[in-house]
Amino acid sequence: MIHQFVPQLYFNTIGKHPPILMIRDGDTVITTTVDARGWDKNGESAATRGNPMTGPFYVEGAMPGDTLAVRFESITPNRDWAWTTNMLAPAVIDPSVAATLPASDIVRWTVDVPQGVAFLEDPTPGLAELKLPLRPFLGCFGVAPSNGQFISTATSGSYGGNMDYKGLVTGTTVYFPVLVMVMPCKAMEKSSVQVSKYRWMFGLLLAFKKAKR
């Protein structure tokens, strides 16, 4: 079955949130995300910044010990601009160097989907001809972690989370361990999946498959 889902609520943690859509083994979900700052396709604030997540979706019949396969059938930008910052993230460099960095600013990029490229809206002279090929990937998604935890979408672990791996593109299948039973609306217990993104806006087409135990 194909499900069309328009998100209205987002979470900044991965955990046993009440799922908002029940799906079955082999189903497909077509949905969208907001960006890492919670900006939607119109550039309006739709969620709290910090990798807000679309979902969760729960997969009927998935049990702890199962493996859940999530395939990205399509990941498409649904906004004609994106953003980065003009400084390295302090967390990825030596703390003593990070302390000397100036404050970062937002830098906007034009996203030309028909041409398949992105380029700076206001480049410095040395970057005026820079055009980067589009290869959209999903930076943050996963399943509910064990032990009833609600874990920040800033981190990652065996449940997924903020992986920021550029190989998570259209055509990729990701395998997650089903770690918990989730109780949606105090009615049915299922496994749940949440998806988010990073600095782009995406339209997503995801297919779910429960691998055999």
Image (cartoon, helix red, strand yellow):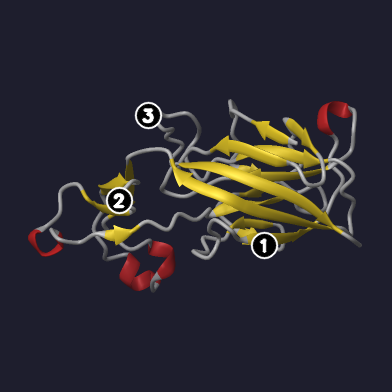
Helix, strand or loop for disc 3: loop
Q: CA distance from mark 1 to mark 2?
A: 36 Å
**Residue 103 image offset from top left, x and y in percent:** 26, 53
Chain-order first, disc 1 or disc 2: 2
Can see residue 36? no
**Residue 67 image offset from top left, x and y in percent:** 82, 59
Give the residue displayed 24% in from the left and 59% down from the top. 131
Q: Which mark is residue 115?
A: 2
**Residue 104 image offset from top left, x and y in percent:** 27, 53
Give the residue displayed 55% in from the left and 48% down from the top. 74
The residue tagged 1 is 157
Which amino acid, by three-letter code, is at mark 3?
Asn
Helix, strand or loop for disc 1: strand
Give the residue displayed 52% in from the left and 45% down from the top. 51
Q: Nearer the viewer, residue 130 or 53?
A: 130
Q: Which mark is residue 42?
A: 3
Q: Is residue 159 above or below residue 181?
A: below
Can see residue 105? yes
How would you rate the neighbour count of disc 2 (Cα within 10 Å): few for under 14, some for 14-19, many for 20 or more?
Answer: few
Which amino acid, by three-letter code, is at mark 1?
Gly
Instruction: Please identify the quarter of the rendering in which residue 201 is found.
Output: top left
Q: Nearer the viewer, residue 31 or 141?
A: 31
Q: Residue furthest left?
A: 125
Which amino acid, by three-letter code, is at mark 2?
Gln
Helix, strand or loop for disc 2: loop
How would you rate the neighbour count of disc 3 (Cα within 10 Å): few for under 14, some for 14-19, many for 20 or more?
Answer: few
CB within 8 Å, label 3 to label 2: no
